[in-house]
Amino acid sequence: MAREVRKSVSDNTRRALWGRGAGVCYMCHRPLTGDLLTGKDELNLGYVAHIVGAVSDGPRGSKQRSSVLADSIDNLMLLCNDHHRVIDHPQHWRDYPEELLLRIKQSHEAKVAVVTQIPPDRKTTVLLFGAGIGDHDGALSAERAKNAVFPDRYPDHREPTILGMDNLVTRDQEDLYWRVQVENLRRQFLRRVKVRIEDGEVSHISVFALAPQPLLIELGRLLGDITPADVFQLQREPAGWRWNDDQPALDIVLDEMPGVGPEIGLIIGLSATVDFSRARAVLPGAPVYRLSIDEPRRDCIGTRDDLARLRAAMRSVLNAISKRHGRGARIHLFPAVPVSAAVEIGRVWMPKADLPITIYDEHRDKGGFHPCHQIGEISVTNEVAL
């Protein structure tokens, strides 16, 4: 029966199917050319599979339609070895009725059609930073990230660029943790991102990050605002990295507590409420500014426009603090923000124009906010080149 099926499909139809399917399995999207171990691209790992069986007594076969549809591209799918076997297996083929396979085929070919229409200048470098990236069931899986950039952009490489922070034995209440993590991030960024930007290989970056807020702010500082970037936010409902356009627009307000001195408090309370008193506990008598929303919540960033509003508010308050308090002042930042907001805070900060910032992290074992990282005063070039 296998020989009969292979002879029933013409070479022209096979070539057309490979084009429609983009050379990957319709069911698991596994590439069907090449070998990951040897790097050889001439291997053909794909099978042309029939939806309505090519023979009447085969899986999903029909006395009336099998011979008619045997060479019809609308009745064919491109599958890997595993899925080709399972849909025709004597014990399992009934679990894959014609209707289901047609839906899979139509969905896959529609996606390929959309992707191939994306202009070449819309490519992006997918960047992952955080813990658990090796677990494909986790939030930072490569597949979830790549799917999130469509249909606006497409990944420039099959695999994302990964800046990892796994397998460290220190904990975030230890000073050593922050020194090691920041140094690790800077070195990886230099080797895996910065040199590629300077070589012109990277023209746009899509950022997917899950990490403590000071590290996310540092990542944003390293990225800066020179290279165009889209920073994505992990959504809770529905779960994933897709934007939630049904969410109300973010309304950020600025208020302040007057004080004196060159040490300036800046609270950004978007995902949780941070009272002035908590900053004053660290900076007695200091002026404290606060950016906040009416109902702080973890999923407050739902759209790209929300991030644009945050960037504008952050830029405005940094300018106001610098103008009012002078170049000798220092900002003490108390953030309670979603992950995308933390990255954007770092991107907004300008090394030559803005005041140095000491970033605080909240830890209950230490009784509240404690300083863990600072940006400014040391040149960016020297920091990254360590």
Image (tube, rainbow, N blue to C red):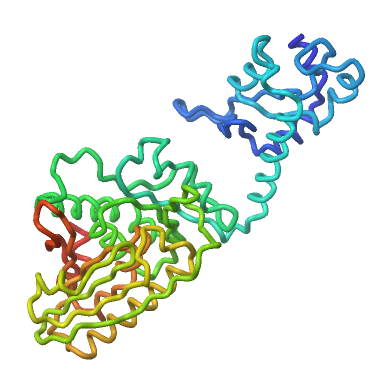
In the rendered structure, the answer to whether residue 315 lies left or right of residue 277 reads right
Q: Residue furthest front?
A: 295
Residue 60 shows in the view: yes
Residue 203 shows in the view: no
Q: Residue at x 79, y 27 (%)?
A: 11
Q: Residue at x 21, y 38 (%)?
A: 167
In the rendered structure, the answer to whether residue 27 lies left or right of residue 71 reads left
Q: Residue at x 59, y 28 (%)?
A: 42
Rendered image quadrant of residue 12: top right
In the rendered structure, the answer to whether residue 347 lies left or right of residue 45 reads left
**43 or 31, nearer to the observer:** 31
- Residue 44, position in %: x, y? 62, 25
- Residue 372, position in %: x, y? 14, 60
Q: Quadrant of the N terminus?
A: top right
**226 or 292, nearer to the observer:** 292
In this rendering, the answer to whether 164 lies above or below 122 is above
In this rendering, the answer to whether 174 lies above or below 75 is below
In the rendered structure, the answer to whether residue 42 lies left or right of residue 209 reads right
Rendered image quadrant of residue 27: top right
In this rendering, the answer to whether 100 lies above or below 255 is above
- Residue 161, position in %: x, y? 39, 47
Q: Residue at x 39, y 44 (%)?
A: 140
Rendered image quadrant of residue 317: bottom left
Q: Residue furthest bottom?
A: 324
**260 or 128, nearer to the observer:** 260
